[in-house]
Image (cartoon, rainbow, N blue to C red):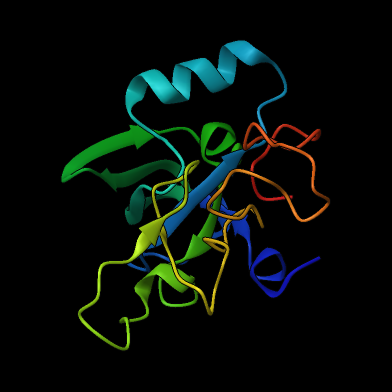
Amino acid sequence: MTKENQIETSLFALETHRPARICGFTARDEHDQVRLREIGFAEGDLVEILHVGLFGRSPLNVKLHGTAIAMRPNEAKMIRVIPADLHRDTEKPASNAQMDVCDIHGLPTSAEKPCCGACGVASSGVASSGVASSGVASGGTACE
C-alpha cells in the first residue's frame, strides 16, 4: 500500500470545504458507477463538500466542475478521494518545463514521481508489476 492509498477516503467521510481529487469508485455494481460517471464524476476531478444535512449528513451538497450537486450519503460513499492538499498533483514543478501526464488520470507526472499517485500506475500505463493496466484494479477502484 502506498502513502497515497493510506490517505484515501470516501467523499462521504471528507471534511466540509476540503477539496479532494477523485481517484476511483467502489460501486457494488456497474450501473451505480455508470450513473456517477454520467453525472460528471471521473478520476482526477476536483470535488468539495459545500454543505451537509443535519440528520445523518444527508443530503450532501457537493461542488463538481463549478456546479453544486445534491447527493445521498450512499452515493458519496462510492466515490474514493484523496484530499487535494495531500495529493501529488498539487505540488508545483521545480521548473517551467513541460510535464508528462498520467495516461489514465491526466494528472502530472515527472521523472522524480513516475506515478500520478492516485493509482500507482506509471505514465506509460504499465503498473509496477509490469502488467498493462486498464486503470481499474480488481477491486473496482483505480486507487488500490
> Is residue 129 placed above or below 90 in the rendered structure?
above
* Horizontal relation, residue 36 to residue 125: left or right: left
> Is residue 92 placed above or below 49 in the rendered structure?
below
* Horizontal relation, residue 110 to residue 12: left or right: left
- Quadrant position of the N terminus in the picture: bottom right
Q: Residue at position x 40%, y 33% from top?
A: 71
Instruction: Point out residue 113 in the picture as x, y percentages from the top left corner.
Output: 54, 74
Instruction: Point out residue 106 in the picture as x, y percentages from the top left corner.
Output: 39, 48
Q: Residue at position x 79%, y 48% from top?
A: 130
> Toward the viewer: 64 or 125?
125
Q: Residue at position x 41%, y 49% from top?
A: 44
Instruction: Point out residue 70 in the picture as x, y percentages from the top left corner.
Output: 32, 34
Locate residue 98: give its quadrant. bottom left
Q: Residue at position x 46%, y 42% from top?
A: 43
Locate residue 139: give its quadrant. top right
Locate residue 28: give its quadrant. top right
Instruction: Point out residue 64 in the picture as x, y percentages from the top left corner.
Output: 27, 43
* Horizontal relation, residue 64 to residue 54: left or right: left
